[in-house]
Image: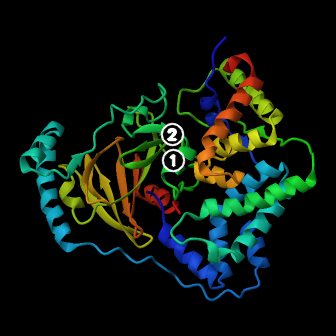
Amino acid sequence: MIMRDLHDDLTALAVEWPPTPDLAAAVAARLEAPAPERRAWRPPRAAWRPALAYGLAALAAAFALTMAVSPSARSSVLEWLGLKSVTIERREPSAPPPRPGALGSGLGLGTRATLGEARDRSPFLRLPRAAGLGRPDAVYLGAAGVSLVYGERPGYARAAETGAALVVQQFRARVEPFIEKTLGEGTRLERLRVDGDPAFFITGAHGFAYETEDDQVRFEEQRLAGNTLLVERADGLLIRVEGRLARERAVAVARSIG
Amino acid sequence: MVGRPLEQDKLVERARAGDAVAYAALVREHEEIAFRTAYLITGNAADAEDAAQEGLVKAYRALHRFRVGEPLRPWLLTIVANEAHNRRRSAGRRAALALRAAGEERPSGEAAPSPEAALLAGERRAALLGALARLRDDDRVVIGCRYLLELSEAETAAALGIRRGTVKSRLSRSLERLRAELGDDYA
């Protein structure tokens, strides 16, 4: 007799729900209040301290040098510079090991979690709704925020080394103004706009530095062999879409996050 | 940590000022989870639709009580779930919630199972759903909220009308009863 893990089996259980009725239309029809004209609206961009930005740009230039050397050199150079607030994101050996073979378990994204647990941490978590994507195959909680991992799907080719086709991360951080300076050699950066927000499509990347809400600068390594789209949203959310994706598909994934 | 609260807050502000279109945009975002939560509680789609619609209209009228900056989802779920509980109580005893397993297990990203393994997995899912259906309503709703709807603890507490601090212990007791219902495999 095989002892089964109830938590795992319940997590994997998918249920056929009845189709959701069009409640938005029904509710709107019941509300008597007249609807004023809809205006396009964008949230105000948070003020950014120029002095800090300048310092970060200088710091980032130092980063670019260290990155060209080797990962182990990064931390020692930072130490030498006395940059105590800078930490390099490492794989987290202290995190409990995820189920063997679980998708994304080797990517160092943190602890495996259910979507419910991810919502405990991030009450505003939104899933991408891009066509054909469906729900994530695995969810991880780490220092970098919530990571959603997707296996192979039509249009999303898996990376041979990891088996994952797409990683979508959401965390509170920003990469401007030093994004270009943190990119290593052989990296190509393309600037674009996604729904008005600044975005960066990076090919041949090794990782990038970013600043968190509490003014920590961190470095995030490349997880999959592929391209990275970073969208710096006006609400302070940094979205990272990584995989072997064409630019348009990566943009579609980022845009589908509400 | 994650999200777009600014946009939500702006929509809430406009809805409070009487903008039904802004409110519809908020509802659109949450209608699926609202309906499914109501379905989990009432056990049938017609009651779930009524409860969700009624709850969402009441939430509109109560928007002035919503604290801007907080996530809207658990707040809406509290009101919808309350409507659903009222309907379930007034309907008296009825057939247990019928949940069917979707065609496939959620993909795990692991290698495709053999036909034998797939058959076994299918039997296991049926046994699990059968045991869930035999549980008391309260047990089924808390397990359903956490695992089938994947609600957070705060949202589960909202759906159950209990304090957040009691979700863990309630869930753990309900899982024990489910385990007992399933027998030796999960002992």
Q: Chain of mark 1?
A: A
* Residue A34, picture quadrant: bottom right
> Can the viewer see residue A104 in this picture?
yes
The answer to which of B30 and A148 lies nearer the viewer is B30
Q: Which residue is mark 2?
A: A113
Corner quadrant of residue B74: bottom right
Quadrant where the C terminus of chain B sits is top right
Percent x, y of residue B112: 58, 27
Q: Closest to the observer: B37 or A161? A: B37
For the point 56% across and 33% down, the residue is B108
Extreme top residue here? A1
Is there one chain holding both mark 1 and mark 2? yes
B106 and B142: which is toward the camera: B142
Up the image or down, A31 lies above or below A4; here it is below
Indicate left or right for B76 with A166 as reference. Answer: right
* Amino acid type assigned to the residue bearing label 2 in the image: Ala
Which residue is found at the position 83% from the left and 63% from the top?
B50
- Whether pointer 1 and pointer 2 mark residues with C-beta atoms closer than 8 Å, the reply is yes
User: On the picture, is A233 further left or further right than A129?
Assistant: left
- Specify whether residue A134 is in view: no
Q: Residue at x 74, y 44 (%)?
A: B141
Q: Which mark is residue A128?
A: none
| Amino acid at dot 1 | Ala
Spatial CA distance of label 1 from label 2 is 6 Å
For label 2, count other residues whose C-alpha is less than 10 Å away and answer few (under 14), some (14-19) or many (20+): some
Residue A133, compared with residue A46, is above or below; it is above
Q: Report the chain holding disc 2.
A: A
| Residue at the disc numbered 1 | A118
- In the rendered structure, the answer to whether residue A72 lies left or right of residue B14 reads left
Q: Is residue B146 left or right of residue A164?
A: right
The earlier-in-sequence mark between 1 and 2 is: 2
